[in-house]
Image (cartoon, rainbow, N blue to C red):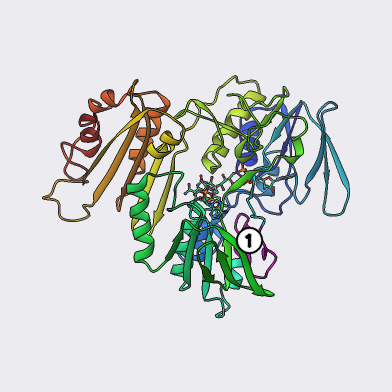
């Protein structure tokens, strides 16, 4: 029986545990987690705060008992504070202060990420909130019951910040959304798309304060104001959503790391030490859209990287297909999806790209019900004409559309091949000359 120890059992650790125990009878899995809950779907936090779901019950899909029923040994509320990579021993300390020692043949690090907390004055004031764990959501929900919490300032207009801005507005609060960048969602969309999101947010009464750098938080015991380089914003609650950093102190001295500290892994998810794997938010990914190592913290990447690592641990030699950072967001009626690289990020990286835009109704004009416009941008390499990114925006759910582009980037499909790809027509669904074909056919 080979022994596998997994440190961290949220999305990545749970997927690795399940994959090993579902596919092998001669591996014993022991998992450690410092938290008292696992598999919390962070994305549900905004739905819960915005009263779009009744409560948090459905936001978990696993727990200690489920993993134990498969044969795993699970230590909850037991942070691992030391790993001896030579003797292959993991040391954890449980809630009673007892030291737990576990030897391993294979080690999987799934310690995830931590919210980036800015070093500014006033972070210690009451009602300044982080938003990562289930416990954070519980505290925010409880505090929102206080009618004196009227003005909420969200710092960071990335995915979490934009989703929470909508949630607090739906909860009846006055919301200000601040970002150091001059727009929302700068990492995922080009200007024509972020402009749509910005208009969507402000049309629902959310005050946008972009291009502002938070300098300090002020208040007497409780936060009262957010002071930026351009303005002072009234705040009874401040939520910090300015990104994640990989949680890699445990292996920092022993494992090769990416520039942001994430564990560098190969396509088998193996780190610089054989039989030590890293998965999810604590590890790098291979980004097919830039043909290079990158860091993209997503639950989808966490699960897929876990499956790859787990199969390699049990002797199935498989490689990661790489990722494109596919993602989606739905704010009020506006749905936006993107994959790969934006034209703006390509320019920053000095890549020579072109892009083709097309906007049209989803279905023929004679369909008057449920027929919305779709905006599409496809980014491709100016020389090879290989597709490197795509962005879509509509009131329709175009998630299947962005999956097409994710596969196209992964398989290095050119814009010219896409132009002639077989896409069906039926007026209930689309137009004979649909926007994907039209965008590709009209590409420069
Ligand atoms: C509000 C919010 C919304 C999100 N929405 C989406 C979304 O819609 N789609 C999407 O793809 N992604 C989303 N994400 C990102 C997604 O949640 C993360 O990418 C995902 O959680 C990564 O999973 P992970 O298991 O790698 O890391 P984590 O979820 O960070 O889990 C790491 C685990 O390791 C444990 N741990 C850490 N250190 C130790 C230690 N030393 N000893 C023992 N245990 C340890 C922690 O307790 C934790 O349980 C969202 C995140 C947030 C916060
Ligand atoms: N729908 C989804 O797929 C989804 C939803 C939520 C979270 N996530 C993932 O979770 C991770 C964390 O999300 P996030 O929103 O925290 O990160 P993010 O990287 O998406 O956004 C961080 C935002 O904060 C801004 N920022 C950075 N430093 C700042 C500062 N000092 N002051 C003001 N603004 C600052 C950045 O410009 C950026 O817009 C990301 O990887 C994200 O993709 C995904």
Q: Residue at x 36, y 29 (%)?
A: 353
The spot of residue 261 in percent (x, y) is 66, 37
Q: Which residue is drawn at 61% across and 24% down?
A: 266
**Disc 1, SS:** helix
Asked if 355 appears above or below 41 in the picture, the reply is: above
Is the C-beta of the residue carrying label 1 under 8 Å from the nearest atom of ligand 1? no
The spot of residue 378 in percent (x, y) is 32, 35
Confirm whether residue 391 shows in the render. yes
- Residue range of the region highlighted in magenta in the rendering: 120-139
The residue closer to the viewer here, 284 or 181, is: 181
Asked if 388 appears above or below 131 in the picture, the reply is: above
Confirm whether residue 15 shows in the render. no
The spot of residue 347 in percent (x, y) is 41, 34
* Quadrant (top left, top right, bottom left, bottom right) of the N terminus: top right
| Image-quadrant location for residue 249 | top right
Asked if 204 appears above or below 272 in the picture, the reply is: below
The spot of residue 170 in percent (x, y) is 44, 68
Q: Residue furthest bottom?
A: 147
Within 10 Å of disc 1 (Cα), the crowding (few <14, some 14-19, many 20+) is few
* Quadrant (top left, top right, bottom left, bottom right) of the C terminus: top left
Residue 127 forms part of the magenta stretch: yes
Q: How many labels does the image show?
A: 1
Q: Residue furthest right?
A: 98
Left or right: 197 as drawn, with respect to 20: left
Q: Which residue is drawn at 27% across and 23% down?
A: 417
Residue underneath mark 1? 136
Left or right: 373 as drawn, with respect to 109: left
Residue 357 forms part of the magenta stretch: no
Q: Residue furthest front?
A: 229
């Amino acid at each position: 029986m080979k022994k596998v120890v997994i440190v961290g059992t949220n999305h990545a650790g749970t997927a690795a545990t399940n994959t090993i125990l579902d596919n092998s009878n001669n591996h014993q899995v022991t998992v450690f987690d410092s938290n008292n809950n696992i598999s919390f779907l962070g994305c549900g936090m905004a739905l819960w705060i915005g009263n779009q779901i009744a409560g948090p019950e459905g936001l978990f899909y696993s727990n200690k008992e489920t993993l134990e029923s498969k044969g795993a040994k699970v230590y909850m509320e037991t942070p691992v504070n030391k790993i001896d990579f030579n003797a292959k021993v993991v040391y954890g300390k449980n809630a009673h202060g007892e030291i737990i020692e576990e030897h391993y043949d294979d080690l999987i690090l799934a310690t995830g990420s931590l919210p980036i907390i800015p070093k500014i004055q006033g972070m210690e004031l009451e009602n300044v909130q982080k938003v990562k764990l289930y416990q954070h959501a519980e505290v925010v929900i409880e505090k929102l019951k206080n009618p004196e919490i009227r003005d909420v300032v969200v710092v960071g207009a990335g995915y979490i910040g934009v989703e929470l801005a909508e949630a607090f507005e739906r909860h009846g609060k006055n919301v200000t959304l601040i970002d150091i960048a001059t727009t929302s969602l700068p990492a995922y969309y080009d200007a024509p798309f972020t402009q749509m999101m910005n208009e969507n947010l402000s049309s629902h009464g959310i005050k946008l304060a972009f291009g502002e750098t938070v300098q300090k938080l002020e208040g007497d015991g409780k936060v009262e104001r957010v002071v930026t380089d351009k303005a002072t914003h009234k705040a009874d609650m401040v939520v910090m959503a300015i990104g994640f950093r990989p949680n890699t102190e445990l292996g920092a001295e022993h494992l090769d790391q990416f520039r942001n500290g994430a564990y560098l892994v190969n396509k088998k998810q193996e780190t610089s030490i054989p039989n030590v794997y890293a998965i999810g938010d604590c590890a790098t990914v291979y980004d097919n859209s830039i043909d290079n190592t990158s860091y993209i913290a997503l639950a989808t990447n966490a699960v897929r990287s876990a499956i790859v690592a787990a199969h390699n641990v049990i002797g199935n030699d498989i490689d990661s297909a790489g990722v494109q950072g596919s993602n989606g967001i739905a704010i009020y009626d506006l749905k936006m999806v993107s994959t790969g690289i934006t034209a703006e990020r390509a320019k920053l990286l000095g890549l020579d790209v072109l892009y083709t835009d097309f906007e049209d109704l989803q279905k023929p004009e004679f369909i008057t019900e449920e027929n919305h416009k779709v905006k599409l941008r496809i980014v491709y390499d100016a020389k090879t004409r290989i597709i490197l990114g795509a962005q879509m925006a509509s009131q329709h759910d175009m998630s299947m559309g962005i999956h097409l582009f994710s596969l196209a980037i992964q398989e290095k499909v050119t814009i010219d091949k896409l132009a002639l790809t077989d896409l069906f027509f039926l007026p209930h669904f689309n137009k004979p000359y649909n926007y994907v074909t039209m965008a590709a056919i009209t590409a420069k």
